[in-house]
Amino acid sequence: MTMYSDSSSSIVRLNIGGKKFCTTIDTLTQREPHSMLAAMFSGRHTVCKDSEKGYVFVDRDGKHFRHVLNWLRDGVVPNLSDLECSELLREAEYFQLLGLVDGITEVLNKRKEDEEMDTELTRTDIIKCVQSEKVRLRGVNLSGLDLSKLDLSFVDFSYACLKNVFFSRANLHCAKFRDVDAENTIFHNATLRECEFTGANLRGALLAGANLQSANLQDACLVDCSFCGADLRSAHLQTADLTNANLEGANLEGANLKGAKLNNANLKGANLQRAYLRHVNLRGTHLEGAKLDGANLLGAIR
């Protein structure tokens, strides 16, 4: 960031990570008088200026600095995405703009509360449900819930919205996930033996270390999924889309991958012994160190 002050007009010129801004001393000092910016232009400190154009440089990303200035001018928190809010929060913390920090935090907390209100059931509701003998949660919106470490074996989640649900270390043995929307859901180290995921959308899901032995993932969207170290022995992956999926070190012994899409999939060090790969296009698939002993590769494109 480069800053320059013209004493006659109180104009300040700033260069934030290469982006140029122009404001006034009053803007930088009045709304947040205890901030770093206010201290820099309080007159108590010497500010280094660019010798040619009078800019003072501060080494920060200038992407969101216009929002910082607008906050100092108007006191309004900008309407941004969660990711952008998080980025702006880091800048507000750096510049010690405590009012902006509080404002962004309040916005993010309110959004989280609204998302939880949209969810039809809570973790406590689920715990009560699973005490019954047969649980059916078909078509229910459970997005964003933390269901980690619960015993959810044999639960029917078919057609449910499970976006961003946390199933880490949960027991989901023989659970049904037919046609669910489970984008970006976390199944890290979960037990998913003999689960049914036919037609499910698991784009971007985390299944690292999960036990998916004999699971049915036919026709599932597994784009950008992480299966690092997962147990997929005898899994059914016919016509599943594994584009860009990370299966490094996964155990796919005896798995059926007939018609699966493996474009840019990472299968480094994976165990593909006795796997069914007939007529599968393996071009662009990363197979360094993979075990292919006994795999059916008849007609496979390599």
Image (spheres, helix red, strand yellow):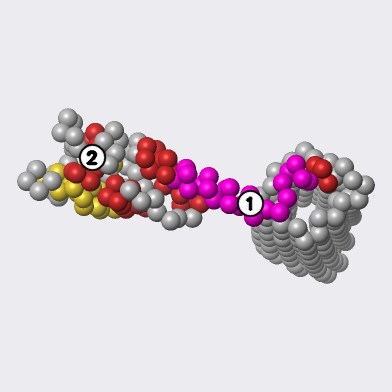
Which structural element holds mark 1?
Answer: helix
**Left of 27 or right of it: where is 64?**
right
- Residue that mark 1 sits on: 117
SS majority, magenta: helix
- Residue that mark 2 sits on: 29
- Work out whether residue 297 or residue 240 is closer to the camera in this orientation and state it: 240
Quarter of the image that includes the N terminus: top left
**Left of 158 or right of it: where is 202?**
left
Residue at 72%, 46% in the rendered image: 122
Q: Give residue 237's position: percent from left, percent from top.
A: 82, 60
Label for residue 274?
Answer: none
Tell me whether circle 1 and circle 2 mark residues in contact (CB < 8 Å): no
Q: Give residue 223's position: percent from left, percent from top.
A: 68, 60
Q: Quadrant of residue 242?
A: bottom right
Q: Which residues are magenta?
A: 104-126
**Left of 88 or right of it: where is 293?**
right
Residue type highlighted by circle 1: Met
- Work out whether residue 232 or residue 125 is closer to the camera in this orientation and state it: 125
Residue 96 included in the magenta stretch of the image? no
Q: Give residue 263's position: percent from left, percent from top.
A: 69, 63
Q: Give residue 36's position: percent from left, percent from top.
A: 29, 35
The crowding category of the residue bearing disc 2, from other C-alpha atoms within 10 Å (few below 14, some 14 to 19, many at least 20), is some
Residue at 17%, 41% in the rendered image: 49
Residue 106 included in the magenta stretch of the image? yes
